[in-house]
Amino acid sequence: MPSNYPGFRYGADRETFSAAKVKALESLLIEKGVITGDTVDTVLGYFETEMGPFNGARLVARAWVDPAFKELLVTDCNAACEAMDFPEGMSGAEGEHMRIAENTPEVHNVIVCTLCSCYPWPTLGLPPYWFKDPTFRARVVREPRVVLSEFGVELDESVTIKVWDSSAQIRWWVLPMRPPGTEGMSETELAALLTPEAMMGVATVSV
Ligand code: FE
């Protein structure tokens, strides 16, 4: 899966090197007085508790059980966010214009930012490392079926794959199909089935 995504052509320790560079940068910024030692922890804590894929999971679970809410989510994602009891500002901060693409038996959607790493922070949190990698960004638009297969998503040839390119203006994510066998589940139970990868289109949801 993601961390050892086979499309990458470099060693598995590259992320460790990046982490070391980030640590060095953080130390310099603290030393120069630009940030304090708490700044990074505060930001990371926010993404662990307030703004993350748990929000997207709740939106999708509600859409699965409430057709009117699904219509709202598909036509106006930000209005759907406003209708939830999310923390203040959850429709802003890198998510001013979010759009969700609905998977169906005929169409499978996958997201990318070919320019950089634009991602719907309010619903999915921070993008994973591989999403920002040039290899993924280049290949998923050129050969999406192959890339999806490398992620373990094998789609029938009859299924159309749509690749949605996010930008600083519009940030895409995916409404996965509700899996069979979940008819009696509560919204909370359904939300627990969802993964960030499923809401990016590089995984499907299973029970
Ligand atoms: Fe970007």
Image (spheres, rainbow, N blue to C red):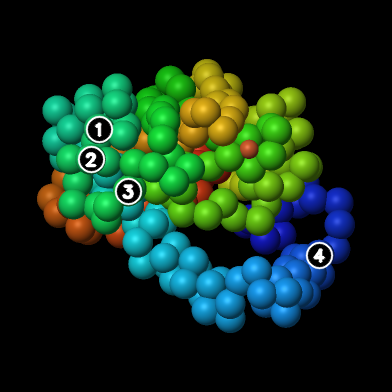
**Residue corresponding to mark 2:** 82
Of the numbered discs 3 and 2, the one sitting upstream in the chain is 2
- Disc 3 residue: CB within 8 Å of ligand 1: no
Kind of element beneath mark 1: helix
Residue 60 lies, with reference to residue 9, above or below; the image says: above
Q: CA distance from mark 1 to mark 2?
A: 5 Å
User: Of circles 3 and 4, which is in front?
Assistant: 3
Q: CA distance from mark 4 to mark 1?
A: 39 Å
Q: CA distance from mark 3 to mark 4?
A: 34 Å
Count residues near mark 1 (Cα–Cα under 10 Å), then give few for <14, some for 14-19, many for 20+: few
**Residue corresponding to mark 4:** 14
Of the numbered discs 4 and 2, the one sitting upstream in the chain is 4
Judging depth in this view, the residue of 58 and 81 nearest the camera is: 81
The type of residue carrying mark 2 is Glu
| Residue 136: % across, % down | 72, 41
- Disc 1 residue: CB within 8 Å of ligand 1: no
Of the numbered discs 3 and 4, the one sitting upstream in the chain is 4
In the picture, measured across the screen, residue 106 lies left or right of residue 56, that is right
Residue at 58% across / 30% down in the picture? Answer: 167
User: Of circles 3 and 2, which is in front?
Assistant: 3
Residue at 43% across / 20% down in the picture? Answer: 106
Count residues near mark 4 (Cα–Cα under 10 Å), then give few for <14, some for 14-19, many for 20+: few
Q: Which image quarter holds the N terminus?
A: bottom right
Kind of element beneath mark 2: helix
**Residue corresponding to mark 1:** 79
Residue at 32% across / 48% down in the picture? Answer: 89
| Residue 99: % across, % down | 41, 29
Q: CA distance from mark 4 to mark 2?
A: 39 Å
Residue sticking out furthest to the front: 33
In the picture, measured across the screen, residue 13 lies left or right of residue 204, that is right
Q: Is residue 27 visible?
A: no
